[in-house]
């Protein structure tokens, strides 16, 4: 295989990995919110979420992560000069943080498997946005490479993080307000 083929496969598996990470945390949110249902409903929902989480994690997300790392490593093997580039070194830091994120998500899944729910839906929503921050940072670093103004990039990175946090907080307020309005409709 040539370098461009390896690069294409790397990108395909990056996309698959992120899709899995985004969806797994969404399942955790629904699983966490199922606690508010009746015990019978919770049992049914939790069992279904556990099946979905297990299949998503072990059939899609983790294999995509492994293949992303394999093809990324092959790119370094075929073009070792990449490792000397400052933008690549920064990308590797973010990818390392993304790997830590991946394994924390795995720990959350294993906790949910034994009904140990330590995260509420709000904290999981914020956790989900962290993957978005990693995605934005990595794409901008790789796309802009050496033409990147690191000061503006770093400020942009934090701006994206702040905007995402604000959006999640606003969503929570709107959702809470919606629940209050729904409840008040039944009492009038």
Image (tube, grey):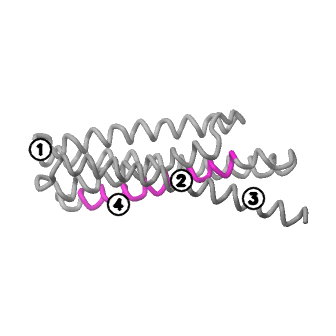
Q: Quick one: label 3 or label 4, which is nearer the N terminus?
A: 4
Residue linked to disc 1 = 85
What secondary structure is found at the residue carrying circle 4? Answer: helix
The vertical placement of 51 against 184, above or below, is above
Q: Quarter-wise, where is residue 144 in the image?
A: bottom left
Residue at (69, 33) in percent of width and height: 116
* Residue most extreme to the front: 188
Residue linked to disc 2 = 168
Predominant secondary structure in magenta?
Answer: helix
In space, the residues marked 2 and 1 are separated at their CA atoms by: 35 Å
What segment is highlighted magenta in the picture? 6-32
> Left or right: 176 with respect to 3?
right
Mark toward the viewer: 2 or 4: 2
Q: Nearer the viewer, residue 179 or 123?
A: 179
In space, the residues marked 3 and 4 are separated at their CA atoms by: 40 Å
In space, the residues marked 1 and 3 are separated at their CA atoms by: 51 Å
Q: Quick one: label 2 or label 4, which is nearer the N terminus?
A: 4
User: Which label is found at residue 12?
Assistant: 4
| Image location of residue 101, percent across then percent down | 44, 39
In space, the residues marked 1 and 4 are separated at their CA atoms by: 23 Å
Mark toward the viewer: 1 or 3: 3
Position of the N terminus, as image quadrant, is bottom left
Are circles 3 and 4 on residues that touch, CB within 8 Å? no
User: Which label is found at residue 179?
Assistant: 3
Crowdedness near tag 4: few (<14), some (14–19) or many (≥20) residues, C-alpha within 10 Å: some
Q: Quick one: label 2 or label 1, which is nearer the N terminus?
A: 1
Q: Is residue 81 magenta?
A: no
Mark toward the viewer: 1 or 4: 1
> Left or right: 152 with respect to 178?
left
Q: Quick one: label 1 or label 4, which is nearer the N terminus?
A: 4
Q: Quick one: label 3 or label 2, which is nearer the N terminus?
A: 2
> Left or right: 138 with respect to 54?
left
């Amino acid at each position: 295989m040539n370098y461009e083929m390896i690069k294409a496969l790397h990108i395909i598996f990056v996309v698959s990995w992120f899709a899995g990470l985004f969806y797994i945390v969404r399942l955790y949110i629904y699983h966490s919110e199922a606690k508010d249902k009746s015990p019978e409903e919770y049992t049914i929902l939790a069992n279904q979420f556990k099946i979905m989480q297990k299949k998503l994690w072990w059939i899609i997300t983790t294999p995509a992560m492994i293949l992303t790392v394999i093809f990324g490593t092959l790119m370094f093997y075929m073009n070792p000069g990449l490792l000397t580039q400052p933008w690549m070194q920064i990308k590797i830091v973010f990818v390392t943080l993304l790997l830590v994120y991946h394994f924390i998500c795995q720990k959350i899944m294993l906790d949910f498997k034994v009904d140990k729910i330590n995260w509420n839906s709000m904290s999981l929503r914020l956790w989900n946005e962290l993957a978005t921050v990693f995605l934005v940072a990595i794409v901008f670093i790789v796309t802009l490479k050496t033409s990147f103004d690191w000061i503006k990039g770093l400020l942009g990175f934090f701006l994206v993080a702040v905007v995402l946090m604000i959006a999640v907080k606003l969503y929570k307020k709107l959702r809470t307000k919606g629940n209050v309005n729904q409840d008040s409709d039944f009492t009038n």
